[in-house]
Amino acid sequence: MYTNEVMDHFTNPRNVGEIENADGIGTVGNAKCGDIMKMYLKIDNGIITDIKFKTFGCGAAIATSSMATELVKGKTVEEALKLTNKEVIDRLGGLPPAKIHCSVLAEESIRAAVADYYQKTGRELPESLKKSLEHDNAHGEE
Ligand code: FES
């Protein structure tokens, strides 16, 4: 049911924990299952130098978040905003259809943490981020 990559990231997740004095923190919940993801970013000169996550979520959420943190570490915040859950799933060799919604937590929590960073540093949110936050809010009220 799960690929070796998924099992690897689930049993040995990368970047679990929290960052003290993080530059951006994003917390999102999954409307389908009620699980929660919290993402912490350390950012220097627009580069994500460290990233950690904590979750009250299932194995697929852990594996996708672990992979997502690996993919954005060392990237610019703009590049991190382009990460999609599809890309994360591809890098993990796929997920069962019933578990696709779990992968969205990682993408959304990274975007929320970047938005927090933009707000804390007094920067204007990029249009793409504004739209996705509006969409997320609308989603949460469904
Ligand atoms: Fe909730 Fe997977 S079942 S994140």
Image (tube, helix red, strand yellow):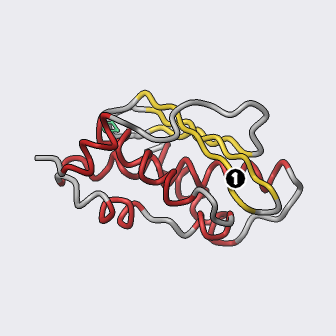
Task: Please identify the residue farthest to the left as the structure is shown.
Answer: 1
Q: Nearer the viewer, residue 129 or 39?
A: 39
Q: Quadrant of residue 31?
A: top left
Horizontal side, residue 29 vs residue 111: left or right: left
Mark 1: which secondary structure?
strand
Amino acid carrying label 1: it is Thr
Residue 66 appears at what percent x and percent y?
A: 43, 45
Quadrant, the C terminus: top left
Q: Nearer the viewer, residue 134 or 118?
A: 118
Horizontal side, residue 50 vs residue 46: left or right: left
Task: Tell me what residue is drawn at x 29 percent, y 57 percent.
Answer: 92
Ligand 1 resides in the quarter of the picture at top left
Residue 133 appears at what percent x and percent y?
A: 60, 56
Residue 8 appears at what percent x and percent y?
A: 28, 43
Q: Quadrant of residue 56?
A: top left
Q: Quadrant of residue 44?
A: bottom right
Residue 107 appears at what percent x and percent y?
A: 49, 55
| Looking at the image, residue 137 lies above or below residue 30 | below
Task: Provide the residue designation for mark 1.
Answer: 49
Task: Tell me what residue is drawn at x 44 percent, y 46 percent.
Answer: 65
| Looking at the image, residue 108 lies above or below residue 55 | below
Task: Please identify the residue farthest to the top as the structure is shown.
Answer: 56
